[in-house]
Amino acid sequence: MSNQKIKFVFFGSDAVAKSALVAMARFGLVPSEKADVAVLVSYGKILTKEVIDSFPLGILNIHPSLLPKLRGPSPIKSAILEDLEVTGVSIMKLDEQVDHGPVLAQEIIALSPQVASEAQLREALFEKGAELLARVLPEYLGGKLVPKEQDHTQATYTHKFKPEDAFLPYLEWASKAGEFERKVRALSEEPGTYSIIPTIRGKKRVKILKAHVESNKFVPDTVQPEAKRPMDWQSFLRGNPLM
């Protein structure tokens, strides 16, 4: 069965889902309006049993973690924040619980969460997920691949991050350098890492878009003051000397 003949309904509701769909198209997977199987990526809603059961072969999910690790809404961000050496993608068959269903296939990606930004990691994971789905879907539809139940005793969970999770207090830049650098890679895009900088012109709230660790101290690379365009850290300091 060639990928061009495979028909599936697609569930997705945001930019993450769109990027996954684009990646799937590169591997010959194009959705249809009616099919026996569906694919779900970053849909944002829990589907009812009636919807799941309406597809004779179920709904498959491209989940960007090695399940049962990192279940929930933020596996990519959490892989960075937890400083994991490796992560990967799982093709899972949906059931009524969150990220709980049996797994068809998994694969590790080469890009490490210890060096990647959330955007870089997301692109790599869904590129691998699309490739893996294209590879296993014909076997699954042909009855040659049976999903395997997860080891639920090994499950870990993620949560949705709030703006306060992305605050990087200036006085803790030295003591939490590694943690803050990971937060910038994981959270700068959403909900947006920021700090309050004490300058001779008063306290300045700035978004921190890129950063690194140098001599065990957190150092911004690119920042964005309120109502201003992004700029490099040294340019900000020239106009706003620190107290």
Image (cartoon, rainbow, N blue to C red):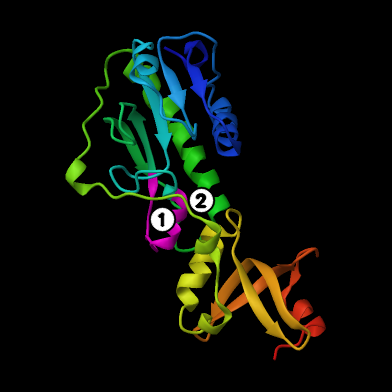
Q: Is 52 placed above or below 224 here? A: above
- The spot of residue 85 in percent (x, y) is 37, 60
- The spot of residue 198 in percent (x, y) is 67, 84
* Residue at 45% from the left image edge and 23% from the top image edge: 39
Q: Say which of 202 and 123 sits in front.
A: 202
* Residue at 39% from the left image edge and 25% from the top image edge: 60
Residue 83 magenta: yes
Q: CA distance from mark 1 to mark 2?
A: 9 Å
* Residue at 33% from the left image edge and 36% from the top image edge: 99
Q: Is 197 placed above or below 102 here? A: below
- The spot of residue 71 in percent (x, y) is 34, 44
Callouts 1 and 2 close, C-beta under 8 Å: yes
Q: Say which of 222 and 240 sits in front.
A: 240
Q: Which residue is mark 1?
A: 79
Q: Secondary structure at mark 2?
A: helix
Q: Which residue is mark 2?
A: 121
- The spot of residue 182 in percent (x, y) is 49, 66
Could you tell me the amino acid type at mark 1?
Ala
**Mark 1 or mark 2: which comes first in sequence?**
1
Left or right, 99 with respect to 232, comes to left
Left or right, 141 with respect to 163, comes to left
- In this rendering, the count of numbered labels is 2
Left or right, 117 with respect to 60, comes to right
Could you tell me the amino acid type at mark 2?
Leu
Q: Is 241 placed above or below 108 here? A: below
Bounds of the magenta span? Answer: 76-88
